[in-house]
Image: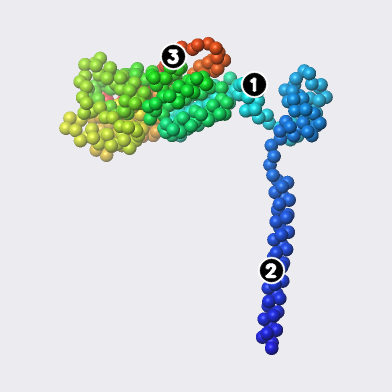
Amino acid sequence: MYLLFFDKLINIFITLLEKIYEICTQTFAKTFAKITKKMKKSIPTLKAMAEQLGLSISTVSRALNNHPDISSETRKRVQNLASEVNYIPNIFAKGFRAHKTNILGVVVPNITHYFTTTLIRGILEEASLRGYRVIVSESNNDVAKQTEMLNTMIQFGVDGVLMSISKMTRDIDSILKVMHTLPLVLLDKASNKIPCTQVVINEEEAAYNAVEHLINIGKKRIAIIKETQFSYNSEKRFAGYLRALKDYNLPIDEKIILTVEDISLTQGEQMTNILMSLKEKPDAIFAITDSAAIGAIKTLKKHKVKIPEDIAVVGFSNSLNSTIIEPQLTTVDQPGQKIGATAVKYLIEEIDNPNVELMNKTIEVRSNLIIRDSTLSIK
């Protein structure tokens, strides 16, 4: 009897709790909906401001641009409301009307590479001085992604494109199509096949000077670690290497000319292991990137090779890591900021002169050889 009564009491209590939970849940949902509705973000537009002020959209637009046909009273009303609602003009809509956005597009293979960051810094600073904004994108050395980024730049309505091409680029049709639509300037990683302005460093001369430095400190068997023939930069540097050996009557030995698809620190280590396995070892290594040169130094140290007495090493880029490695790396300094700034100047010149037929030209920015301990201590 008592047990039955107790069960009924428990059931009533459970039913009551469920009802309370249901009421609380509904109340919370309604309250939350009201709060989120108030919190919902809305971007102020010309149309919304025009409706609030009882004016036409064109009147509001002209008032914001201080058009002389709009009275000072109306201008003040419009500008006060714009300030109150934090109105920011849509630059794409504005650019569509004016056929000019003052935006430059940038496409680079790898945005995290130290040299690329210096390029972008130069681009941003020069563009800002000239009243331009910049959109930066990355292809990851993927040709399909590169084409996608170029098309995206066109969709964004940029006034022109600065581009460092992917080293995997074989078919240039997509790039040529962009050139029919927008001004295009190549920088750093360029191509002789693309008829446009190209801003690069004096690649061949820089490599020549690096190899000549090795010859001047007494090195006669100089190896090179480079990329495949599809890399514009690598082939230019290889040409400088070959010319230096020829000018100083040194033999060209195919066994110490090592080529890789994607040059890196790891590849520098692996290629140096191959060089160390040779019966007749080199007395110097010229790597076309600092990463590969640093990989070479790491491997030489593992083999207990004295640097630079037994084997000297020269890199290319003057990256931050070139001063961290021991011994510090002799390397070619690439003035990335200057290259970026120079490219912006030429691109804006083409944007400002759309009817002028600009000749295909290559602008070479001079580099310097930074001599450090990986070649310095030889007496």
| Disc 2: which residue | 18
Does the rendering let one see residue 42?
yes
Q: Which amino acid does label 1 sit on?
A: Ala
Is 31 above or below relative to 306? below
Q: Is mark 3 on a helix, strand or loop?
A: loop
**Quarter holding the C terminus?**
top left
Mark 1 crowdedness (10 Å alpha carbons): few <14, some 14-19, many ≥20: few
- 270, 147: nearer the viewer: 147
- 188, 268: nearer the viewer: 188
Q: Which residue is at a point 81% across and 31% down the rendered structure image? A: 54
Q: Which amino acid does label 2 sit on?
A: Glu
299 relative position to 87: left or right: left
Q: Distance between the residues labelled 3 and 1?
A: 30 Å
- 300, 379: nearer the viewer: 300
Mark 1 and mark 2 lie on one chain; the one further toward the N terminus is 2
Q: Which amino acid does label 3 sit on?
A: Lys
Picture coordinates of residue 319 (x, y %)? 41, 30
Mark 2 and mark 3 lie on one chain; the one further toward the N terminus is 2
Mark in the foreground, 2 or 3: 2
| Disc 3: which residue | 361
Picture coordinates of residue 175 (x, y %)? 45, 24
Q: What element carries label 2?
A: helix
**Quarter holding the N terminus?**
bottom right
Query: In the current view of this chain or complex, which residue is farthest to the right?
Result: 73
Q: How far apart are marks 2 and 3 (CA)?
A: 80 Å
Mark 3 crowdedness (10 Å alpha carbons): few <14, some 14-19, many ≥20: few
Query: In the current view of this chain or complex, which residue is farthest to the bottom?
Result: 1
Picture coordinates of residue 338 (x, y %)? 47, 21
Mark in the foreground, 3 or 1: 1
| Disc 1: which residue | 98
Q: Which residue is at a point 48% across and 20% down the rendered structure image? A: 179
Does the rendering let one see residue 287?
no
